[in-house]
Amino acid sequence: MIFGLLRVRNEARWIDRCVASIQPLCQQIIVFDDHSTDETPAICARMGAHVVLSAFGDLDESRDKDYLLSRLYTYCHPKPGDYALMIDGDEVLEKEGSRKLSAAIDKNGTVAYMLKILYLWDSETTIRTDGVYGRFERPSLFPLSEEIMTFRQTGARGHFHCSNVPSQFIGRCRPLDAAVIHLGYRDSDDRIRKYEWYRRIDGDNPAEDGYRHIVQGDIAQIPAHAKLMHAGPLRLEPLMVAW
């Protein structure tokens, strides 16, 4: 079996597409809702997902994912050989993703996998491909076991960037030729809003270069032609993956 895990907040614009994209693959989907103020949890529930409302009052991505994983064990009682797929609420698994992931698990059922993340930019037919955007793969699919597994605590505020697989699999994931389409950076207004949010919470993190790459070409201080630590100059290409 494959179980879907989602940690979400205010994703009502696209959560239906996210859930629908993994339903053919996942026998059950568990959603951890981090105090959404929109219809996100209601949409998930209507689509048949099991929704868990956060009881925590602060921001801690690692803790939330630990709790989400614990709810999976409580509600679904997975067995060795079962898998979990964790993507974000503003992401959609490509159309061929279910077939590709199922085939990988059938062939090698003890391996964790990385998926390609394709970032929509300015439209739903265009992706960003310069710098990290052109090569980004995120661990997202991992085997379940009787072992207690936890997500890593990072040096970032709120333990941002703690990955979508438990710490036991960090550095041990295999690449898989399957893609997830990220919708959250599609629109300039959303990129600016996310940039300002990251700067407010984790702006002094030198490893992230102030998160400037998120708004490259959107604000005058960070022009499209600039070469940044993680990206640039800005390059956009057609999306060639069906979703």
Image: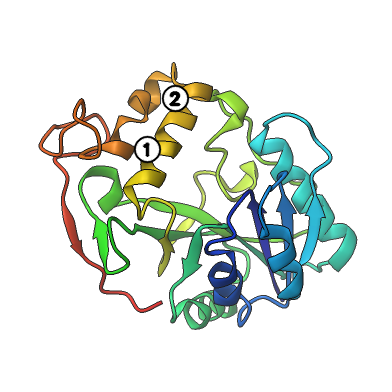
Neighbor class of circle 1 (other Cα within 10 Å; few <14, some 14-19, many 20+) is some
Identity of the residue furthest to the left in this view: 225
Q: Amino acid at mark 1?
A: Ile
Instruction: Name the residue tied to disc 1.
Output: 192
Residue 91 x, y percent position in the rendering: 49, 61
Q: Is any atom of residue 236 visible in this view?
A: yes
- The structure residue drawn at horizontal position 88% and vertical position 64%, both measured from the top left corner, is 75
Q: Is residue 132 left or right of residue 29?
A: left
Question: In the rendering, which numbered label is found on residue 233?
Answer: none
140 up-or-down from 160: above or below:
below
206 up-or-down from 134: above or below:
above
Q: Quadrant of the N terminus?
A: bottom right
- The structure residue drawn at horizontal position 66% and vertical position 41%, both measured from the top left corner, is 151
Which residue is nearer to you in this view: 54 or 154?
54
Q: Is residue 40 left or right of residue 218?
A: right
Query: Do labels 1 and 2 touch, CB within 8 Å?
Result: no
| Numbered circles on residues, count | 2
Q: Is any atom of residue 146 visible in this view?
A: no
Q: Amino acid at mark 2?
A: Arg
Q: Is residue 227 left or right of residue 97?
A: left
Question: In the rendering, which numbered label is found on residue 199?
Answer: 2
- The structure residue drawn at horizontal position 80% and vertical position 35%, both measured from the top left corner, is 56
- The structure residue drawn at horizontal position 32% and vertical position 47%, both measured from the top left corner, is 188
Residue 92 x, y percent position in the rendering: 49, 67
User: Which sits earlier in the primary sequence, circle 1 or circle 2?
Assistant: 1
Element type at mark 2:
helix
Q: Quadrant of the C terminus?
A: bottom left
Distance in Å between CA atoms under marks 1 and 2: 10 Å
Residue 236 x, y percent position in the rendering: 18, 56
Nearest to viewer (mark 1 / mark 2): 1
Neighbor class of circle 2 (other Cα within 10 Å; few <14, some 14-19, many 20+) is some
